[in-house]
Amino acid sequence: MRVKTAGGMVLAASHREHPYRCRGIRVINGVNALLADTPHEFARAVISLFREQTIADRLATEGRRTVEEHYDWRKTYSAWNEVYQFS
């Protein structure tokens, strides 16, 4: 998992990333992060976060919710405990 990307999401920071860095994470462009392939797209995404506080807030909230629902260590490790108990 991409720890820095998930870390930014869990801090409820509005997030923008290159799609490559989001492999393996449940990132949905425009829902819990903004993805940008080129420097121009990246700049446009950053500017949109400064101009539209509601978008930044929504991305931050959804990013944190995604990490809490899918990557919380208590949930992850409880699933591993079940695997090891049956081994």
Image (spheres, helix red, strand yellow):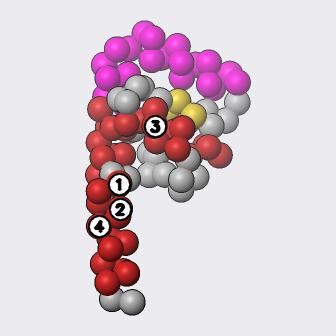
Q: How far is disc 3 from disc 1 in space, using C-alphas?
A: 13 Å
Q: Is residue 51 left or right of residue 85?
A: right
What secondary structure do most residues of the magenta stretch adopt? helix
SS assignment at label 2: helix
Q: Is residue 2 left or right of residue 63?
A: right
Disc 1 marks which amino acid?
Trp
Crowd band around label 1 with a 10 angstrom C-alpha radius: few (<14), some (14–19), many (20+): few
SS assignment at label 1: helix
Crowd band around label 4 with a 10 angstrom C-alpha radius: few (<14), some (14–19), many (20+): few
Q: How far is disc 1 from disc 4 in space, using C-alphas?
A: 8 Å
Q: Position of residue 22 (x, y in %)?
A: 56, 46
Q: Is residue 81 left or right of residue 9?
A: left
Determine the residue positioned at 37% across, 81% down. Answer: 84
Q: Is residue 49 magenta?
A: yes
Asked if the residue at tag 2 contacts the one at tag 1, i.e. Cβ–Cβ closer than 8 Å, the answer is yes
Foreground pick, 43 / 13: 13
Asked if the residue at tag 2 contacts the one at tag 4, i.e. Cβ–Cβ closer than 8 Å, the answer is yes
State which mark lies toward you, 3 or 1: 1
Say the numbered circle drawn on residue 76: 2
Asked if the residue at tag 3 contacts the one at tag 4, i.e. Cβ–Cβ closer than 8 Å, the answer is no
State the residue position of label 4. 78
